[in-house]
Image (cartoon, rainbow, N blue to C red):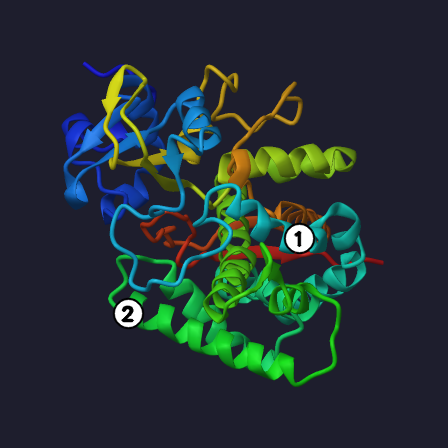
Amino acid sequence: MDATPGAADAMPLAWCRSDFDPFSPDLATRLQPTLDRMRAQCPVTHSAAHDGFWVVTGYEDVLTVAQDWQTYSSAHGLNVVPAPVTIRNLPVQADPPEQRIFKRLITPFFTPSAVAAWEAPTRALVNRLIDDFAAAGECDFMAAFARPFPARAFFELAIDAPAGDLDDVVHLASRSSTPNAPDAGECWRGLAVWIRRFVASRRDQPARGDVVDAVIHADIDGRPITEDEIVGTIQLLILGGLETTAGTLGQLLARWCAEPEIPAVLRRRPQDLGRAVEEMLRMDGSFIAVARTAMRDHVLGGQPISAGDKVLVYWAGANFDGAEFADPHHFDLDRPRNRHMAFGIGPHRCAGSNLARLNLRIAVEELLRRLDDIALAPGAEVDYHSTLTRSPLTLPITFRPIVEG
């Protein structure tokens, strides 16, 4: 008998061992118990789905794969199923030294000091969004806040894109990052078309000195950046800036509904909000998995990995590993160290992590200040899409508006 905590809610052990499918709708509702079971019973296992790939769920094994880019390549595919388009997302679909060139293009625009300048306009945007639904005492949190907030912040502050295009781009980004969506390929192509049009318009405008200008005019190892490289770099910025923060916001609010003691303790300890954001990222980061390609024969967790094998590592599995995090399913503001992998780890660690932290901190501060008694709407259930990122599809909530003064 499987004694793993929560095993009754997990996918069957035989499925976990040999038929694991990251796009299974059943897995979407049973993700964490399933990853817990796999970490305990089969931490490195081979699935026959999608022509075969390895699944890695333990902290140390995930760390090994993420840091050893020479053995586990990002340049040879990030998906366990073929991508619907061929334009690379850069820098994540490149290995060092090429990866470092593209990452250096964008990181100066997302340092702590760079994003600090966006604090006031970000807080103003958060409150405008809350103003639109607070009086009603209910909303679909994903539609009213979690999706529009990071999208509008990124459009307005990071890339200065036309506000009128926002809804279309949000739709294209969301659908293209869901590999099993029937229109994923069409949306990938649509997003690339929008980026090319946006880049062309920016070339006709005075320089702003922002990340878009830096990408458009980049020099790549002594040559001008190509059009596809421009599209791939801006494409990654959009996907990272919109989808991941929206998913994390949705998941953490769903957790608040299920565990109201969390917002209660945050109200009592506002001085610890920075630590709280890290714990929220550990438990509810939406970037849950990524694939690598093995470049040589290798042994991982006692299993023989062959050159050419796909290897799917689960950040969400590593982040609940009890060997690294004591009592991992407990939200702990006093956790002595929190080396979570919500932003990945190694050379491909997310370049936008500082912006994500800023957005999450401000959103949490203002949601706590303006909404109380947050609960899932009567009869509602939280459904998640099934892919390598995680986000509620909808999140109907009720709450009591806080009227100050």
Q: Residues within 10 Å of mark 1 (few under 14, many from 20)?
A: many
Name the residue carrying label 2. Answer: 183
Horizontal arrangement in the rendering, residue 318 relative to residue 347 (left or right): left
Name the residue carrying label 1. Answer: 359
* Residue 86 spot, x, y in % from top left: 34, 62
Closer mark to the observer between disc 1 and disc 2 = 2
Residue type of the residue flagged with mark 2: Asp
Q: Please report the residue visible at 38 percent of the width from the left and 54 percent of the height from the top.
A: 380
* Residue 369 spot, x, y in % from top left: 73, 51
Quadrant where the image shows the C terminus = bottom right
Res 261 seen here? no
Q: Residues within 10 Å of mark 2 (few under 14, many from 20)?
A: some
State which tag comes first along the sequence, 1 or 2.
Answer: 2
Q: Please report the residue visible at 62 percent of the width from the left and 75 percent of the height from the top.
A: 161
Q: Secondary structure at mark 1?
A: helix
Name the image quarter holding residue 320.
top left
Q: Nearer the viewer, residue 350 or 376?
A: 350
* Residue 294 spot, x, y in % from top left: 31, 34
- Considering every residue shown, the one lying at the far front of the view is 222
Judge whether 314 appears above or below 394 on screen: above
Horizontal arrangement in the rendering, residue 108 relative to residue 188 (left or right): right
Residue type of the residue flagged with mark 1: Asn
Judge whether 173 appears above or below 345 on screen: below
Quadrant where the image shows the N terminus = top left
Q: Please report the residue visible at 55 percent of the width from the left and 65 percent of the height from the top.
A: 225
